[in-house]
Amino acid sequence: MQDRNTFLSKKMSYALRHNPDKYGIELDEYGYTDLARFIKALNRMHRFDPPVTEAEIRKMMAQANKKRFEIKNGKICALYGHSVPGIIIRAEAKPPKFLYHGTARRFWPSIKENGLLPMGRQYVHLSADTAMAREVGLRRDNRPVILQVDAERAAKDGIKFYYASQEVWLCDQMPSKYLKVW
Ligand code: HQG
């Protein structure tokens, strides 16, 4: 059985990344929605007992292994992972020298051929370090491939990078000439 924190985090991710309509909430162009209304929607949809509160959400966020959400000025957003139509605007930033991407061995031939593509999401997701990339890859393969991205060279060549969180960077796509198996 999933614990309550995991359940809460997954439902919040689903609502804020993929299906705000189902929760009757609207995201602004940066992915933010009114926190009080969001909490009401979560409670209405999932009948949390006792009801979820802002304090519980903040506590879950503080205890999580990754920074997935942000609360600011009475609003909340998912920092990355979106698949809603349109593009959630993320701040462009200068990336570190290297970033990483963990994936399944079976995807490597296609990635080598076509580069990293956003697939079901709005952006390609890159990890700030190899430990995080490994964790991401382990979702799909017990011996994941870790790709090292030459972010510095890609940025010099005009590829845009967007900052999502300390652990996660985004880009529109990543040609394979900037990738190598780590
Ligand atoms: C692969 C989770 C074939 C790509 C994670 C990945 C992350 C290709 C999959 C965040 C390809 C897409 C995102 C190509 C990319 N051919 N396969 N050309 N280009 N792929 O889930 O990066 O825990 O959309 O390698 O930890 O795995 O939910 O992206 O395997 O940070 O907060 O297509 O989601 O965060 O899968 O994961 P995803 P991702 P949370």
Image (cartoon, rainbow, N blue to C red):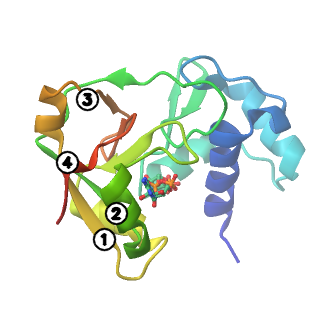
Q: CB at mark 3 closer than 8 A to ligand 1?
A: no
Residue 123, position as x, y percentages in the image:
46, 38
Describe residue 11's horizontal placement relative to residue 42 as left or right.
Answer: left
Q: Say which quadrant the C terminus sits in.
A: bottom left
**In the drawing, what numbered circle is on residue 177?**
4
Q: Say which quadrant the N terminus sits in.
A: bottom right
Residue 39, position as x, y percentages in the image:
74, 36
Nearer the camera: disc 3 or disc 2:
3
- Say which of 30 and 175 sits in front: 175
Crowd class of label 4 (few under 14; some 14 to 19; many from 20; radius 10 Å): few
**In the drawing, what numbered circle is on residue 159?**
3
Residue with the most extreme bottom position: 142
Given the image, on which type of amino acid does mark 4 rest? Lys
At horizontal 41% and vertical 71% (from top left) the residue drawn is 104
At horizontal 37% and vertical 74% (from top left) the residue drawn is 105
Describe residue 77's horizontal placement relative to residue 67 as left or right.
Answer: right
Crowd class of label 3 (few under 14; some 14 to 19; many from 20; radius 10 Å): some
Nearer the camera: disc 2 or disc 4:
4
Given the image, on which type of amino acid does mark 2 rest? Gly
Q: In the rendered structure, which disc, 3 or 4, sits on the residue that comes first in sequence? A: 3
Q: Secondary structure at mark 3?
A: loop
**In the drawing, what numbered circle is on residue 102?**
2
Crowd class of label 2 (few under 14; some 14 to 19; many from 20; radius 10 Å): many
